[in-house]
Image (cartoon, rainbow, N blue to C red):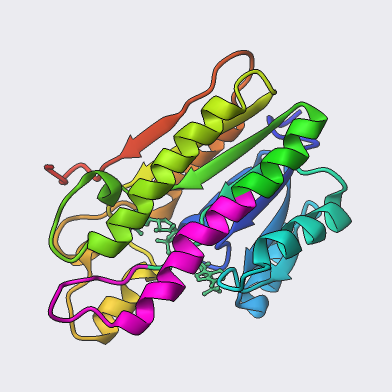
């Protein structure tokens, strides 16, 4: 029997990058996966490819009621949810001279509000059943003060504090909570920077690939017994900070 056989997992941001690699890994380990993002065709194609009862949900997590809609869709699809991977995110650099202020609210909505709302709603759902795993995807940027990362890194830092406290509040409930902070991983997240003529951060060093992070997410989801990995930071081997 595979390690996640019989488990139902929700993965946000599954149409690309780390989320897509995670969906593949969790499905290969036996989980039924609900794939969430905005690009429906990509999700449907991935669901068909990975099989095993995978399903697609096109949803804009920047909308205020998205987390509630996600919980309702997951309950309708699976009945009970065992795993939530809050992975969807966007990157906008925030240098004082150039930050586009119209990007601020969407960044907060997707990278922070949707993750917090989803964490709280799914935590209640899991707590009522006495078990579950929530994995929130942060960034090594949460721990770094570097030019251009103020808004993005600040939101990830806030998410880390929230996630730690959620773990503490759920202690003894059977619901594990952990965060994974990736370093530079080559994905579409740098496309916006590149479209503005800036070099992507994945061009400065040999980056990781999405499956490097997905492997750690799978590890968290497979924990047994009394262990609860609270934080995993994954740096690229050439990242020296
Ligand atoms: P990608 O750009 O490759 O993928 C982002 C995913 O998020 C896509 O599936 C996208 O789908 C989804 N998404 C974005 N906006 C929305 C929205 N409004 N509603 C629903 N889904 C949305 O990025 P990564 O795989 O690199 O990033 C995944 C996570 O990892 C993010 O939280 C990011 O902050 C974090 N991270 C990434 C690092 C890296 O170097 N790549 C480093 C540190 C952290 P769609 O466009 O179809 O909606």
Q: Residue at x 51, y 55 (%)?
A: 87
Q: Quadrant of residue 236?
A: top left
Horizontal side of residue 172 vs 219, given as left or right: right
Q: Nearer the viewer, residue 203 or 12?
A: 12
Q: Nearer the viewer, residue 122 or 135?
A: 122
Q: Is residue 114 magenta?
A: yes
Instruction: From the image, give the main secondary structure of the stretch colored magenta.
Output: helix
Q: Is residue 201 magenta?
A: no
Q: Residue at x 54, y 35 (%)?
A: 166
Residue 169: x percent and y percent?
Answer: 58, 28
Relative height, residue 98 to residue 31 (above, below): below
Q: Residue at x 55, y 50 (%)?
A: 22
Answer whether residue 229 is visible to the viewer in this image: yes
Residue extent of the magenta highlight: 91-118
For the C terminus, the image quarter is: top left
Q: Residue at x 81, y 58 (%)?
A: 72
Q: Nearer the viewer, residue 133 or 8?
A: 133
Residue 46: x percent and y percent?
Answer: 65, 66
Residue 181: x percent and y percent?
Answer: 36, 44
Relative height, residue 30 to residue 50 (above, below): above
């Amino acid at each position: 029997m595979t390690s996640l056989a019989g488990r139902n997992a929700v993965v946000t941001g599954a149409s690309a990058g780390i989320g897509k690699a995670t969906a593949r890994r969790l499905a290969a380990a036996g989980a039924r996966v609900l794939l969430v993002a905005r690009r429906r065709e990509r999700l449907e194609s991935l669901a068909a490819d990975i099989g095993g009862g995978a399903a697609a949900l096109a949803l804009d997590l920047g909308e205020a009621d998205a987390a509630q809609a996600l919980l309702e869709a997951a309950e309708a699809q699976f009945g009970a949810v065992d795993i939530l991977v809050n992975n969807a995110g966007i990157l906008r650099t925030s240098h004082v001279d150039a930050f586009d202020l119209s990007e601020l609210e969407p960044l907060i909505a997707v990278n922070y509000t949707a993750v917090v709302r989803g964490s709280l709603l799914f935590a209640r759902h899991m707590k009522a059943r006495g078990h579950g795993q929530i994995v929130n995807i942060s960034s090594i940027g949460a721990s770094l003060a570097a030019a251009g990362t103020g808004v993005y890194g600040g939101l990830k830092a806030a998410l880390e504090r929230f996630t730690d406290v959620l773990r503490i509040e759920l202690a003894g409930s059977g619901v594990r909570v952990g965060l994974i902070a990736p370093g530079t991983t080559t994905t579409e997240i740098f496309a916006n920077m590149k479209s503005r003529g800036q070099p992507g951060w994945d061009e400065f060093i040999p980056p990781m690939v999405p499956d490097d992070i997905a492997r750690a997410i799978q590890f968290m989801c497979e924990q047994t017994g009394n262990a609860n990995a609270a934080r995993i930071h994954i740096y690229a081997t050439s990242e020296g900070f």
